Image (cartoon, rainbow, N blue to C red):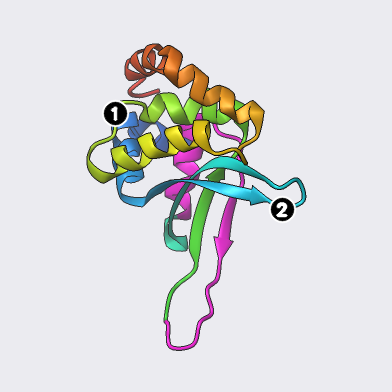
Amino acid sequence: MIILLVDKHKMQNKLITLDYIRGLIEGEGCFTFSTQYRFNRKVPCFEIGMHARDMDLLEAIRDRLGLHNKIYVYHYKSPGINQGPKAILIVREFAQLRNIVIPLCYNRLKGNKAKQFNAWMEKIGADPMVSPRFKFLYKMHKWGHFTRLSENFVGQRTI
């Protein structure tokens, strides 16, 4: 009898396509800003969150995309609300937004999430509280840089 040991994360990574991840982003993702009150600045961020029971799925998405972020688990305790814990992957780092998140989503989302993404890109360029470093993302958008990156990202459907 032969017994094979399989790493579940490696197996999940092979099964998760970029189109599947985009679908989850359209349903569970958010393009927003976090505020650094100490510096009076806004930082663009991408979040995807779901019930904590799907933590393995968020870890597989993070690993498939090559992100280095921690997944946070929040326990909501509000009177009269019976809500389970929520696991959230938050990406705020310039390099990961520029090289992974934006090319993955650029001109590839549909419906309301596409509108949210485009409004987020415009706000990065227009909001004076956004750090000048992150304003470079907007300039790259206007120069057409992400169109080229997005086209290259398409060929990477599975590992």
The quadrant of the rendering that contains the N terminus is top left
At x 60% / y 38%, what residue is drawn? 128
- Looking at numbered disc 2 in the image, what kind of residue is underneath it? Tyr
Residue numbers of the magenta segment: 55-81
Q: Which residue is mark 2?
A: 37
Q: Residue furthest left?
A: 111
Is residue 8 at all visible to an observer of this figure?
A: no
Please say whether residue 64 is one of the residues in the magenta stretch. Answer: yes
Q: Going from the N terminus, do you reach mark 1 or mark 2 first?
A: 2
Q: Is residue 37 above or below residue 127?
A: below
- Mark 1 → mark 2, Cα distance in angstroms: 33 Å
Left or right of 43? Residue 21 is left
* 112 with respect to 70 (left or right): left
Residue in front for this viewpoint, 29 or 137: 137
Total numbered circles: 2
Which quadrant does the C terminus fall into?
top left
- 129 magenta-colored: no
| Quadrant in which residue 67 is drawn | top right
| Identity of the residue drawn at 52% across and 74% down | 76
- Of 93 and 16, the residue lying toward us: 93
Secondary structure at badge 2 equals: loop
Q: Residues within 10 Å of mark 2 (few under 14, many from 20)?
A: few
Image side of residue 90 versus residue 17, left or right: right
* Number of the label disc, if any, that sits on residue 108: 1
Return the residue found at the far right: 38
